[in-house]
Amino acid sequence: MDDQRDTTDRFLPRFDAAGLVTAIVTDADSHVLLMVAHMNEEAIAKTRETGQAHFWSRSRTSLWRKGETSGNGLTLVEMRVDCDQDALLLRVKPAGPACHTGRRSCFYRRVESDGRLSFLADDAQG
Amino acid sequence: MDDQRDTTDRFLPRFDAAGLVTAIVTDADSHVLLMVAHMNEEAIAKTRETGQAHFWSRSRTSLWRKGETSGNGLTLVEMRVDCDQDALLLRVKPAGPACHTGRRSCFYRRVESDGRLSFLADDAQG
């Protein structure tokens, strides 16, 4: 653990070898976990400049604004950083479902003890 | 996006090149984001078998049980998986502060518009 990063008041993201940090996105009002994505330096800058969440797509190797095709953008309420500065929390107001499947949250399945996944009702995804 | 992984009822974690998935840990009661860590196949198995959160430490390259030195273990209430199965949500009951700094959550600093970090009161870390 890098003590400097966990005590400083300077924002010093600890990017991985691919230049990315993990971004955890929650609903600012309900605290519901909506999605997990990745951000590079440009995505962080764009998000802070515009107030709309931008991410780095590892599969498409390009910057994207969440909602640019679906319309379901995420308006930033607050950005936080964790102790070692390799993960960000984006507290947002979502314009619609955050998941590409049309669900409110990407975390719509529970891992059961027998290894099967059970699908949760949309209002139980908190 | 792998359609099969987002519609199946089979638990098929999509491990990265290092054999890891991202684990998001929240307080099962309050939904507060506590910490982010990584899990390999063994960490997932141990967590499911014992009901106590285990992770893979990338810096120490070893499996660890959260709380094995601090006493602040995390009792698993529910495990969820996201649409493309490369991230897990662990809803837990924490025995104490989740952060190594002694704070309830690792996300105790807000990124301000001027790039400075402000420290949040412990009860505002939700």
Image (cartoon, coloured by chain):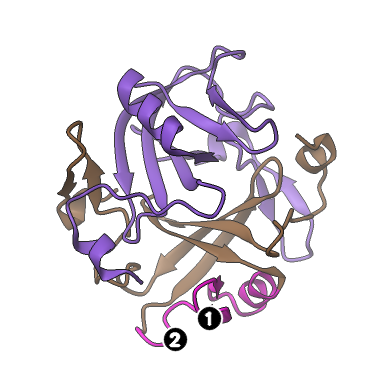
Chain colours: A purple, B brown
Q: Secondary structure at mark 2?
A: loop
Mark 1–mark 2 contact, CB under 8 Å?
A: yes
Left or right side of A60 for B106: left
Q: Residue furthest bottom?
A: B69
Residue B18 on image: x %, y % = 68, 64
Label number found at residue B79: none
Q: Is residue B44 above or below residue B21?
A: below
- The answer to which image quadrant residue A92 occupies is top left
Residue B85 appears at what percent x and percent y?
Answer: 70, 48
Residue under label 2: B68
Residue drawn at (71%, 59%) of the image: B17
Q: Residue A30: in sight, yes or no?
A: no
Tag 1: amino acid: Trp
Which contiguous range is marked in magenta?
Answer: B42-70
Asked where in the image residue B102 lies, by quadrant, the reply is bottom left
The residues tagged by marks 1 and 2 sit, at their Cα atoms, a distance apart of: 7 Å
In the image, B77 versus B109, the foreground residue is: B109
Residue at left offset 24%, top offset 65%: A4
The numbered dot on residue B64 is 1
On whether disc 1 and disc 2 are found on a single subunit, the reply is yes
Residue B62 at least partly seen: yes
Q: Name the one closer to the observer, B31 or A93.
A: A93
Residue A66 at x, y percent in the picture:
53, 23
Mark closer to the observer (1, 2): 1
Instruction: Name the residue at 35% across, 68% down.
Output: B98
* Chain letter belonging to callout 2: B
Quick one: label 2, few (<14), some, or many (20+) residues within 10 Å? few
